[in-house]
Image (tube, rainbow, N blue to C red):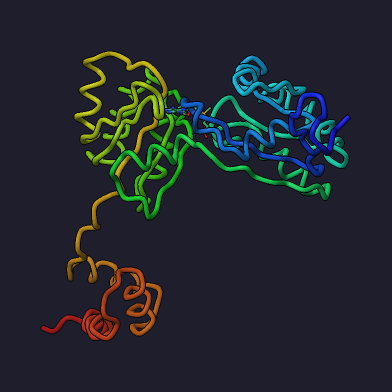
Amino acid sequence: MWLRYPCRLCHVHPVEPLPPGLYIVATPIGNLGDLSTRARDVLARADLIAVEDSRVTGGLLHHLGLKRPMQPYHDHNADAVRPGLVARLGQEAVALVSDAGTPLISDPGYKLVREARAAGHAVVTIPGPCAAVAALTLAGLPTDRFLFLGFLPSKAGARATAIAEVSGVRATLVLYESGPRLAACLSALAHGLGDREAAVTREITKHFEEAVTGTLSTLATRYAGTGPPRGEIVVVVAPPGPPAPISPEDGDVALAEALTRLSAARAAGEVAKRLGLDRRLLYARALALKEPAQG
Ligand code: SAM
C-alpha cells in the first residue's frame, strides 16, 4: 500500500505512486554520483523496472537502498515481453533502464516507446548520462553538427562499406567501439575518411577517464602498438575539411554534360545550383560551348 503522509512510527516520508506510463530513465555510465535526483525518485516510485540485466540494475538499486520488482527486457526477449509491458502501462508506472547510460541509445527500447505511444500511454523521459554526448564534450572537436553511428560492423568488409556511406557527411562522427577492435577500426576510418583529427575517449566518468587526440592514422598506430586498451570507448572523428574550390574546368565539364540534356539557360541554372557558381557567367559559357568551332 502507498502511504501519503509521513509514517508516525519511523517518520520516513512515504513515496506517492507515479501516474501510469512508461518512464525512460538514464543511469550513470560509471560514476554513480551522476544519477539525477529525479531518476532516483522515479526508480523508487515505479511499480516495475524493465531492465537489460537484473544483476546490473540490482546493483544500482542496492546502492540506492531501493528494492523494486524488475522485468528483464533485452534484445533476446523484447518481442515476447513487450506486449505484456505495454498492457501494464494503463494502470502502472513502468521505468525502462539499460545497463548504463540512456536507454534506446545503442540499447533496447525504441519499439517499446513506439508501441506505448500507439496504445495511448504516457511516455516520459528522465534524461541523463550518455556516453556519446559525454565523449563529444571531451573531444574538443566541432559539436554544432554530429552523426552518431553506434557500433560499426565488426567484419572488415561491412565496416568499410559503413564508413564509405558517411565519408561525405559534413559532421563530426561519434561511434562506440570495444578495446580489442579499436586499432583496426581506427585504421579503417583513416583509410575510408582520410587522415582526419580524432579523439579516443575511454572510461568516461570513471577513475581512468581519458581523451587521447591525434590524427586517425597516429591513433591507429598508437593502439596497434600498445595492444587493446581496457574499458569502454567512444571514438569521435572530425568532419571533413572544406571541399576543394571549384575550378572553371569543373564548371565546363558539368556544363558540357548538362548541355546534352538541357537548353543553355537550364543547363546554366542547374550547374549554378549544384556547384554554387554564378549563373550568368555559366550561361555565357554555355552559349560559347554550344557554338560550333570556327575554321
Ligand atoms: N546507452 C548507452 C549510452 O547512453 O551511452 C550506451 C550503451 S552501448 C551498449 C555501450 C557502449 O557505450 C560501450 O561499449 C562504449 O562504447 C560506450 N560507453 C558506455 N559507457 C562508457 C564510458 N563510461 N566510457 C566510454 N564509453 C562508454
Which quadrant is the N terminus positioned in? Answer: top right
Query: Horizontal and vertical percent for residue 262?
Result: 40, 77
- Would residue 140 appear left or right of 5 to someone viewing this image? left
**What residue is drawn where x is 39% and y is 29%?**
204
Residue 240 visible in the snapshot: yes
Residue 263: image quadrant is bottom left
- Front residue of 28 and 251: 28
Relative to 64, 114 lies left or right: right
Which quadrant holds residue 89? top right
Comparing 139 with 2, the one in front is: 2
Front residue of 271 and 91: 91
State whether residue 156 appears in this view. no
State which quadrant residue 11 falls in: top right
Residue under the point 72% across and 28% down: 50
Image point (35%, 53%), residue name: 170
Q: Residue furthest left?
A: 295
In this rendering, the answer to whether 68 lies above or below 257 is above
Q: Residue at x 59, y 19 (%)?
A: 63
